[in-house]
Structure formats: C-alpha cells, structure tokens
Image (cartoon, rainbow, N blue to C red):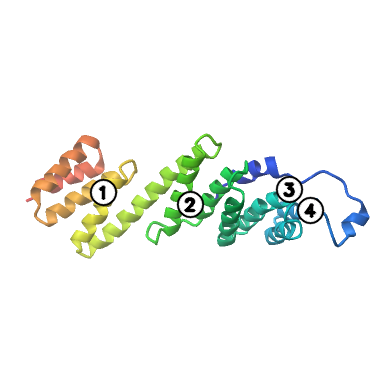
C-alpha cells in the first residue's frame, strides 16, 4: 500500500506552533512553558527529526499535563511516531488520546490516523492480513461515528481498496490449495470471494475457479450453474471464455 500524504496539511491547520515570542531568559529556563516545549517539538517535526519530536511532545504532556498544549501534544506525538514508522507507538498514543478525549473536536482525526497506521502496514496478499483487517475496522469506525467528517469519504475509498486486497489474499490461498489438489479447501477460499467480495476485481476469476473445482470434483450441475452466472455478468470476459471451454470439455 502507498504511503498516505494527506495527513500533515490537515494536521497543520489546527496544530500549528505558536508564533508568540519568548525572551532569551525564558528559553534558557529549565522550567520551560508548555508552549515553548510544544514549539521546540514542532520544529523537530518540521526538520524530520521524528524521534526527537515525539519525545518533545511527550515531554509537554508530562511536565504540563493540564495545559491546552498537552492535549495537542498527545496527537502530535502520535503523528511523530507514525512518521518515524513506529506504528505500535503511534497506535498506542492514538488509543490513549481517544480514551482521554472522546469529545474533542479532533477525535475524528485520531480515529482516521489510527486506520492509516494499520493501512501502511498492509502486507502483500500472499501473507497474513491482520493489519489489513484492523485498518478496515478502523476506517469503518470513522464512517460510522463521523459520517459527515472530512475523513469519511477517504475512509470509504480505502475500505474499497482493502476489500480488494483481502479478496486477493483469499484467491492467493485458494490457488495454492488448488495447485496442491486440496480441492475442498480451495473451493472454500474461492467461495469466500464470491460470497463476501462481490464488488472487487477478484470476483470474475473466483467464479471461474469455482467452476474449475466443481469440474474436478465431478459436480457438473454446479459447474454449469456457475458458468451461467459468469456469462451473465462478464459476457466478454477472459475467464468466461475459459469457463465455456472448460464446461464443454470432455
């Protein structure tokens, strides 16, 4: 999955550093204000020193837990961890933010960013897909809880991509079983796609693979029924042509 590039502009709109000036004495004071610490951490973020930025934002919360800057810093620390590809730390910080500030105006962003952390960890379709499923669940929360937010539309588009990826995973496993003549296991995987991922690009081949397995198992009636479905939905498709030849074979 491609890295997401929409986060920082949105985040910057409500979490920009303060433009207030500070005296030299204040900057050298060990007991720096929350605002000063926040601005220092933000400067690290802009310089792509993400670990130092995260540590700086965490320091704001530790030293000034009841300031307005502490609330902002929780989210910025999570974002800094995300940029540093420390996804577990980012997710933990976001979960904490959501738990402590469920009514904050930026909580929709926290849910959305949580989904992005999982989304960026999606593995190739041949591998285990726990991050993919977690990403889908997180984006579904965004849509359900914040349907009118600026993040809902992108969450929907990401779910569509995720579902195609999950369908691809089922197809990959199904082909493996088919190659190894584990026909029932293969059929279960292909049927998972035809039953649950009907809006994905994987559907046409999945129906064909069902036909292929039914033919191998000697279930001619089921194979013909699936071939008719395939022909109705993909009259000019390459898998339809292959299915027609397969049905008429022998």
Give the Cα distance between marks 2 and 1.
23 Å
**Residue 48 seen by the camera:** yes
Judged from the image, the secondary structure of the residue bearing numbered disc 2 is loop
- Residue matched to label 4: 34
Image point (70%, 55%), residue name: 48
- Residue at image position (41%, 43%) is 160
The numbered mark, 2 or 1, whose residue comes first in the sequence reads 2
Which numbered disc, 3 or 2, marks the residue closer to the eye?
3
- Gap between marks 3 and 2, in whole Å? 35 Å
* Residue that label 1 marks: 206
For residue 91, which quarter of the picture? bottom right
Q: Relative to residue 176, is residue 206 depicted above or below?
A: above
- Image marks 3 and 4: residues in contact by CB distance under 8 Å: yes
Quickly name the residue at label 2.
Answer: 1
User: How many other residues sit within 10 Å of disc 3, few (<14), some (14-19) or many (≥20)?
Assistant: few
For residue 203, what is the image quadrant?
Answer: top left
* Residue 139 screen position, x and y as percent: 48, 46
Relative to 28, say whether 105 is above or below. Answer: above
* Helix, strand or loop status at disc 3: helix
Is 108 situated left or right of 59 in this image? left
């Amino acid at each position: 999955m491609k890295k997401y590039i929409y986060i920082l502009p949105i985040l910057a709109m409500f979490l920009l550093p303060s433009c207030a000036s500070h005296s030299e004495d204040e900057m050298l004071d060990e007991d720096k204000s929350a605002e000063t610490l926040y601005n220092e951490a933000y400067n690290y973020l802009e310089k792509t020193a993400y670990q130092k930025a995260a540590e700086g934002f965490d320091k704001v919360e530790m030293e000034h837990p009841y300031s307005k800057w502490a609330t902002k810093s929780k989210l910025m620390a999570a974002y800094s961890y995300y940029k540093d590809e420390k996804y577990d730390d980012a997710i933990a910080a976001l979960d904490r933010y959501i738990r402590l500030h469920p009514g904050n105006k930026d909580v929709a962003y926290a849910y959305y960013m949580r989904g992005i952390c999982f989304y960026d960890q999606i593995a190739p379709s041949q591998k285990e897909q726990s991050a993919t499923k977690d990403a889908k669940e997180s984006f579904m929360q965004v849509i359900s809880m914040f349907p009118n937010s600026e993040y809902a539309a992108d969450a929907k588009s990401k779910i569509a991509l995720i579902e195609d990826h999950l369908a691809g995973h089922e197809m990959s496993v199904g082909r493996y079983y088919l190659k190894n003549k584990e026909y029932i296991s293969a059929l279960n995987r292909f049927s998972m796609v035809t039953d649950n991922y009907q809006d994905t690009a994987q559907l046409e081949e999945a129906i064909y693979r069902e036909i292929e397995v039914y033919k191998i198992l000697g279930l001619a009636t089921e194979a013909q029924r699936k071939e008719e479905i395939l022909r109705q939905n993909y009259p000019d498709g390459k898998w339809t042509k292959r299915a027609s030849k397969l049905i008429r074979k022998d």
